Image (cartoon, helix red, strand yellow):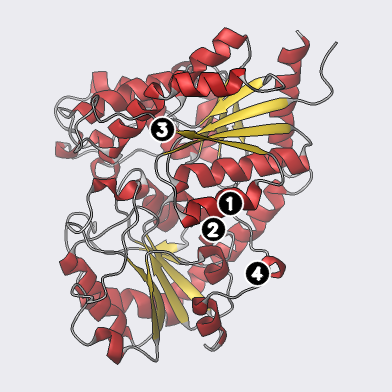
Amino acid sequence: MPPKQLHVTIIASPGIGHLTPILLLGHRLATQHNLHVTVLAVITTRSHSLSQLITSFANHFSIIQIPAADISAVVPPDAKVVTQLNVMMRETIPAIRSAISAMETRPHVLVGDIFAYESWAIAEELGIPKYVFITGNAWFTALFTYSPVLDKQVVGQYVDHKKPFEIPGCKPVRPDEVIDTMLNRDDETYKVYLDQAVGVTLADGMLINTWEDLELQSLDALRTNEVLRSVVKYKPVYTVGPVYRRYEPESVVLKDEVIKWLDEQPDRSVIYVSFGSGGTISAEQIKELAWGLELSRKRFVWVVRPPTGHVSDGSFFKYGQLDTTCDYLPEGFLTRTKKVGFVVSSWAPQVEILNHVSVAGFLTHCGWNSTLESVTSGVPMIAWPLYAEQNMNATLLTEELKVAMRPASLPTKKVVRRDEVARMVIDLMDGEEGKSMKMNVNGLKEGAKKAISTNGSSYISVCKFIEDCWSHVRQ
């Protein structure tokens, strides 16, 4: 006899950027589709922000925190984040298996992010389907899954090529847009990345954090292009996006200091600057950015973290604190900009800021979570990509969707000088391009809202995913 309620267990790898969309997806499945949801959150370090995040969802579904395995004896301390995450998730499989075995109700479906692919073995032991939740977009998904094919086709380093790389049915990817794990094919991380790309395609289907109208071409390629379909092994592709943190003003009882400051500013007068939970820039770039903001004479909120060199690549797992001496900001900057600027140390309530009436633009690293939060808030962007697939996201935002502008050179290759920073901020806030971007992003905002509404494309896609899961349960 089939169960009354479908039990979906979702595995999240470490990092706020991975855990947040998984918790949001779990919330949607539990509250909108009445599924029994359990999230297994693999945790490296505990922090106040992490505890707050988990607590905010704990009343809606079950969340089990699993300490990540100690990998200090397996990988060197200077290993890249991608290698650390892949090895960490592999070494944590016994703990994940134990957590699932201890569940009162056995899961009917297993879902994992792209770093949890080795957990498919648990699903196979249980005889249940397994799905991958790709927290990025469809264009990234196409490149990611096609990478093992490119590896056989491309000679030498990707970055040394002049022509874009063809992804069947999709917009080509320029050499300077490739994911940073593809930058050095001699690095161990590249081999780990290729194994991961193959492992992800072994899932029984893909849930992608995008929606139909946003990426028609890439989604069509994943579903109908014969070459790309063979790469993903003819598995179904479900659009579930945008999965993002919604703004709920009634839930904010105590206002953060930055929100109180924004309340005092004129409408559409503030540029918000943040590089995400793991983004750091050089000390020189911090100074140029500071001078650029000051030269623009525009109001700003800036989430500042210690520059590259103050924290390691492990900033993905640990968050720095603003140095009380602020030696990496120009001398006197905080005093001179006191009336027009608000500098925040390490973390700020981003969704509340982006939805505030005084905010006109967002200078962002183009992480997909931040991108979706900006789009769904109707806020145009200055694209400042740093790592992972952010160069691709920046291209999508600037060239296709036309809701962002970007520096002339990649910020990871060349310091963006103060004059260019000031010009971009002014153009975004006052220029014709900024006005056009604002209209475009408002259109995307409405499209996103429609996609996840009842009978919207993503809502229907999630229903199809659930229907397919039930079909397997009934077999």
- Can you give x and y, in whole percent of width and height, for residue 228 in the image? 45, 23
Q: Nearer the viewer, mark 2 or mark 4?
A: 4
Q: Label 2: how many residues lie within 10 Å, few (<14), some (14-19) or many (20+)?
A: many
- Is 470 in front, or is 50? 50
- Residue found 44% across the figure and 55% down from its top: 397
Indicate the secondary structure of the residue bearing disc 4.
loop
Q: Amino acid at mark 1?
A: Tyr
| Residue at mark 3 | 68
Which mark is first along the chain, 3 or 1?
3
Marks 3 and 2: which is nearer the front?
A: 3
Sequence-first disc among 4 and 3: 3
Cβ–Cβ below 8 Å for labels 1 and 3? no
- Amino acid type at circle 4 is Val
Task: Please say if the residues under marks 1 and 2 sit with CB atoms less than 8 Å apart.
Answer: yes
Pair 1/3: label in front: 3
Of label 4 and label 1, which has the lower sequence position? 1
Q: Which label sits on residue 252?
A: 4
Mark pair 4, 1: CA separation: 17 Å
Provide the secondary structure element on which disc 2 rests.
Answer: helix
Distance Cα–Cα, label 1 vs label 2: 6 Å
Q: Residue 414's x, y, as percent?
A: 16, 60
> Quarter of the image containing the C terminus?
top right
Indicate the secondary structure of the residue bearing disc 3: loop
| Sequence-wise first label, 3 or 2 | 3
Residue visible at 24% across and 60% down?
281
Label 4, label 3: how many angstroms apart (C-alpha)? 32 Å
Q: Which residue is mark 1?
A: 244
In the image, taking residue 157 as reference, residue 189 lies left or right, namely right
Question: Could you say which quadrant of the image residue 423 lies in?
Answer: bottom left
Marks 1 and 3, how far apart in space?
A: 25 Å
Which residue is identified by label 2? 373
4 and 3 marks in contact (CB < 8 Å): no
